[in-house]
Image: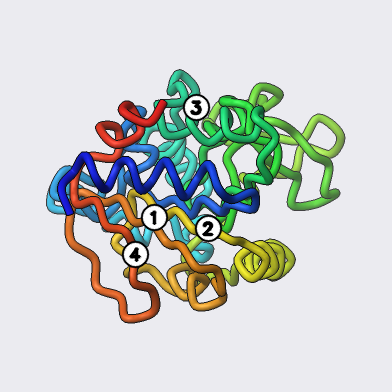
Amino acid sequence: MSMEEKLERFKEIIDQHHRIVFFGGAGVSTASGIPDFRSSAGLYAEDQHRQLPAEEIVSASFFQKNPAQFFQFYFDKLVYPEAKPNIAHQFMAQLEEQGKNIQIVTQNIDNLHEQAGSSHVHHLHGTTEHNYCINCGRYYNYEELILDESGIPRCSADQGIVRPDVTLYGEQLDMTVVDQAIRVMKEAEVLIVAGTSLVVYPAAGLIDYFNGQHAIVINNQPIRTNRIDPLLFIQDMTDVFSVLS
């Protein structure tokens, strides 16, 4: 099937169905200038220049023992308040505007889907937009964070540490969110997978719950999966969505 034929088939599938799940990985955010962890230019590749690997720094145990170091890395490497939604975020938001039931299941911790206008976003690993005091549980959005002299966000009520509501290494995923993701996977007619090689578990295992007829995968590298037989685009995600928009 030629590229033109695949793009036409993609359009037909979208036009003919209502319940669509978009399952996004790090590649969806890298197109907005947010680095990933695993690519040759990602955070893991920078480990040789650090005393500690990124995976250790963003672990629950490191956060508890070294909050100042954790937040220095967090604000420098994981939070990108200037990032803007790209064509993938915009395309999915446009489909929702057209009246389709669009459910976003994302492994990313930014809120670019929400910025683009998507209403139903399931953050498997949490989001940097949501933060809470570890003492009293008081909620803060990102813009409300107040840092002390060590660069640690503090609660205005009790001066407790305010941590991001993201899943750190060594922590379990929020099962409420996982259950929601499983439900929308089961109900979907169409699954679009973008920007992920489906190697990060347990998140990648969610596609096992997809029972629909049409799966579409867009990734710049080949993926290995026996669970779905997708319409496959091995190319830059932005190129595909730019043509469709």
What crowding class fits label 4: few (fewer than 14 Cα within 10 Å), some (14-19), or many (20 or more)?
Answer: some
Sequence-first tag of 3 and 4: 3
Name the side, left or right, on which 161 lies relative to 191: right
Marks 4 and 1, how far apart at CA: 36 Å
Question: Do callouts 3 and 2 mark residues in contact (Cβ within 8 Å)?
Answer: no
Disc 2 on helix, strand or loop? strand
Counting residues from the start of the chain, the first of labels 4 and 2 encountered is 2
In the picture as drawn, the residue positioned furthest to the bottom comes out as: 226
Residue that badge 4 annotates: 230
Judged left or right of residue 50, residue 144 is: right
User: Residue 158, percent across and down?
Assistant: 84, 39
Structural distance between the alpha carbons of marks 4 and 2 = 10 Å
Of labels 1 and 2, earlier in sequence is 1
Q: At label 3, which amino acid type do we have? A: Gln
Q: Which residue is mark 1?
A: 57
Residue on which the image places disc 2: 190
Coordinates of residue 29 in the picture (x, y in percent): 39, 38
Secondary structure under the numbered disc 3 in the rendered image: helix
Mark 1 closeness class: few <14, some 14–19, many ≥20 residues within 10 Å: many
In the depicted structure, whether residue 37 falls above or below residue 207: above
**Horizontal and vertical percent position of residue 176:** 74, 66
- From the image, state whether disc 1 or disc 3 is nearer to you: 3
Density class for disc 3 (Cα within 10 Å; few <14, some 14-19, many ≥20) is many
Quadrant where the N terminus sits is bottom left
> Which residue was labeled with disc 3?
90
Q: CA distance from mark 1 to mark 2?
A: 37 Å
Sequence-wise, which precedes: disc 3 or disc 2? 3
Choose the circle earlier in sequence order: 4 or 1.
1
- Cα separation between marks 3 and 2: 18 Å
Q: Amino acid at mark 4?
A: Pro
Q: Amino acid at mark 2?
A: Val
Labels 1 and 3: the sequence-earlier one: 1
